Structures are given as C-alpha cells and as structure tokens.
Amino acid sequence: MFFKKKLNWKKVADSISEIPGSAAGLGYFEFEGKSICIALHNGKWHAFSGTCPHAGAPLHDGDLDAKGQITCPVHGMVFNIQNGLNTSGEGYHLSCWPLEQREDGIYLGFK
C-alpha cells in the first residue's frame, strides 16, 4: 500500500502582496536558506526553486508562458512550474512546493 508523506506547512507571508513582484504574477523570496519563486498560472499560485539549476540565474527575471512554463533569462532553459520538469530537454529539474493561500497568510508545504 502507498502512503503519502504528510507535509509540514510553514507560513511564509501574511499575504501575496508582501512577496516582491507578486502583483505582476511572478514573485520571489528567501525562506530558510532557499530562494523561492512563485507564479500565478490559470488562477493558481505555484512555488518552485527561485534559481535555475543549470547556472543559478534568478527565475523571477524569466518569462512565464501560457502553458505554465518558465524560461530561464540566461540560457533559455524551460521548466514546467507545476512539476519542475525541464521541458527544453537539458535534463535539469526544479524543486516545487505546494502553496496555499489561507485566511491568515501564505503557506508552503515541505516534506
């Protein structure tokens, strides 16, 4: 039988508007030593690694397309923001975390 590991939810902000850049649909912040990027796609917020795993470029400076893919601003690698898969074929992967907007703030789920 398969068991899902319970997530540890941590509050990262009181509201989305506290996260730099988030008003435009793409934001970023540092949390517990991790650079985290958030993106609004199809009415839902997604959280993923804030830096490209190839060369460390800040993904909040990249472009988000209609398919929910972010393009690295330095070398053009493309990643799916929902699952972290590298869709341009270089074999890299982004870490992704579930993000929830609750009445008392913004939470990320960690394993």
Image: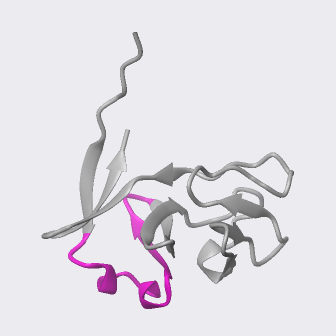
Q: Is residue 12 toward the left or the right of residue 43 in the image? A: left
Q: Is residue 97 toward the left or the right of residue 93 in the image? A: left
Quadrant for the N terminus, please.
top left
Number of residue marks? 0
Occupied quadrant, residue 65: bottom right
Quadrant for the C terminus, please.
top left
Furthest residue in direction top, as rendered: 1
User: Does 57 sit above or below residue 6?
Assistant: below
Occupied quadrant, residue 15: bottom left
In the image, which residues are magenta? Answer: 13-33
Queried whether the magenta region covers residue 10, the answer comes back as no
Q: Is residue 43 toward the left or the right of residue 65 in the image? A: left
> Picture coordinates of residue 104 (x, y %)?
13, 70
Residue drawn at 80 percent across, 76 percent down: 74
Q: How is the image coloured?
A: one colour
Q: Nearer the viewer, residue 20 or 33?
A: 20
Residue drawn at 48 percent across, 65 percent down: 36
Residue drawn at 74 percent across, 71 percent down: 72
User: Does 94 sit above or below residue 7?
Assistant: below
> Picture coordinates of residue 3 (x, y %)?
36, 20
> Picture coordinates of residue 10 (x, y %)?
25, 55
Queried whether the magenta region covers residue 20, the answer comes back as yes
Residue drawn at 30 percent across, 40 percent down: 7
